[in-house]
Amino acid sequence: MESSLDPSVPTPIVTTHRLTKSYGDFTALRDCSLEVHKGEIFGLLGPNGAGKTTLIRLLLGYLHVTSGSCEVVGFDPEQDSVAVRSRVAYLPGDARLPRHMRGSGVLRFFSQMHPQGNLERSLDVAERLELDLSRRVAFMSTGMRQKLALAVVFGPRTPLLILDEPTANLDPTVRGEVLQLVLAERDAGRTVMFSSHVLSEIEQTCDRVAFLRKGELAKKLVMEDLFQRHRLTAWLPEEGSPTTETEDRLSQVPDDLRNRIEQFRIGPSGPHGRNVCIDTAGDLAPTLNWIASLNLEHMRIEPLGLHSVYHSVHLGKDSNDPKWSRTTEVSRQASGAAS
Ligand SMILES: Nc1ncnc2c1ncn2[C@@H]1O[C@H](COP(=O)(O)OP(=O)(O)OP(=O)(O)O)[C@@H](O)[C@H]1O
């Protein structure tokens, strides 16, 4: 893995090429090719059974690769899993800790086990998460055990952290604290890869996201692009206004806006008129100027957010194109079909 001298060119810390894992006839991960860049927070999203844990476990050399390849912090996990694991701090989804030990003993044990272990730091994280370390693991609640596992994993100063659902079983306040810890890792120059089912967490922290669906990489997404996408909804009043004229103008999107408007629908009549919904990408100002010239009422603008993307990917309506698929429906036909 060579690093570029140009800081604007991202350096990969994880690379997978057509990575595939099968169990007999069943393929849990198929042809997965992705890169995680040094210094970023990379999110893994996908419904239950999508293949997130399988991917993570392949990256750590816990599973044998069926076909394809991967490289993690400069090593092939299949050939040199020890080298990989000494450079990666990993939080499994089902972290098992010695039940007979007290919290403080667990932290001491793991900080001695890991080549880059750091007890002081683990204790610091436990304190931030308000964990009582005097209790034995066997008597801890599920959330307390998760806090303890987090204190273990945030101890070593490894270049890469891989966290499988780090906020599972935690209350909202602690979740927020864990996200702050993740952000602080990135600020300190480390790379974090984490899976989560909580879309708002991914939105708050990740720089890039990969969606897995049925073992396939369904979409890659740069979060900055997502934050540039908005949904505008408004009413096109029917009574006492030249509806048809406005509808005509709406459906004839100016040429300079065509590449900004991703989708546009005029719905059936409702209590306030006809519902208009426009999805935009990029700078909102030019679109707003055009919209302002139309006769619309009760306009609302909201960021599109991961939610809408997640569901379109989940339902299989999205393409593999890393950019947004542009399903612009800016024609008379679209408004006609909607009515
Ligand atoms: N040892 C195994 N033998 C057979 N199938 C397996 C094995 N391990 C995992 N699978 C299957 O592989 C698929 C992917 O599982 P994986 O644990 O990677 O999903 P996931 O995306 O992490 O799901 P979740 O969000 O529920 O944790 C699932 O259908 C699972 O049943």
Image (cartoon, rainbow, N blue to C red):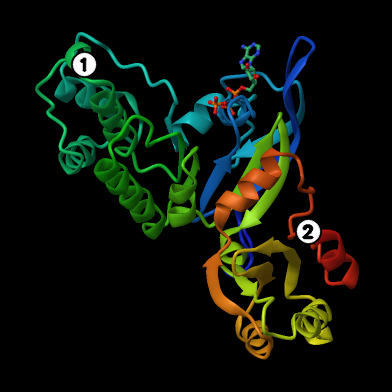
User: Given the image, on which type of amino acid does mark 1 rest?
Assistant: Val
Instruction: Depth check: give the residue in front, 166 or 159.
Output: 166
Q: Which of these two is toward me, 336 or 83?
A: 336
Disc 2 within 8 angstroms of ligand 1 (CB): no
Count residues near mark 1 (Cα–Cα under 10 Å), then give few for <14, some for 14-19, many for 20+.
Answer: many
Where does residue 21 sit, x and y in percent of width and height? Answer: 72, 22
Name the amino acid, label 2. Ser
Query: Quadrant of the image for the C terminus?
Result: bottom right
Q: Earlier in the sequence, mark 2 or mark 1?
A: 1
Q: Are marks 2 and 1 in contact (CB under 8 Å)?
A: no
**In terms of depth relative to the viewer, which is nearer, 193 or 25?**
25
Which residue corresponds to mark 2? 325
Check the image and report above or below for 173 versus 140: below
The residue sitting at the front extreme is 240
Residue 66's image quarter? top right
* Classed neighbour count for the residue bearing mark 2: other residues with Cα under 10 Å, few (<14), some (14–19), many (≥20): few
Q: Nearer the viewer, residue 17 or 228?
A: 228
Task: Answer with left or right where residue 188 lies relative to residue 19.
Answer: left
In which image quadrant can residue 254 be found? Answer: bottom right
**Residue at the spot 65% in from the left edge and 38% down from the top edge:** 71
Question: According to the image, label 1 marks what residue?
Answer: 137
The quadrant of the picture showing ligand 1 is top right
Q: Position of residue 279 (x, y in %)?
A: 67, 67
Is residue 224 visible in the rendered structure shown here?
A: yes
- Which residue is found at the position 61% from the left and 61% from the top? 10
Q: Is residue 215 left or right of residue 179?
A: right
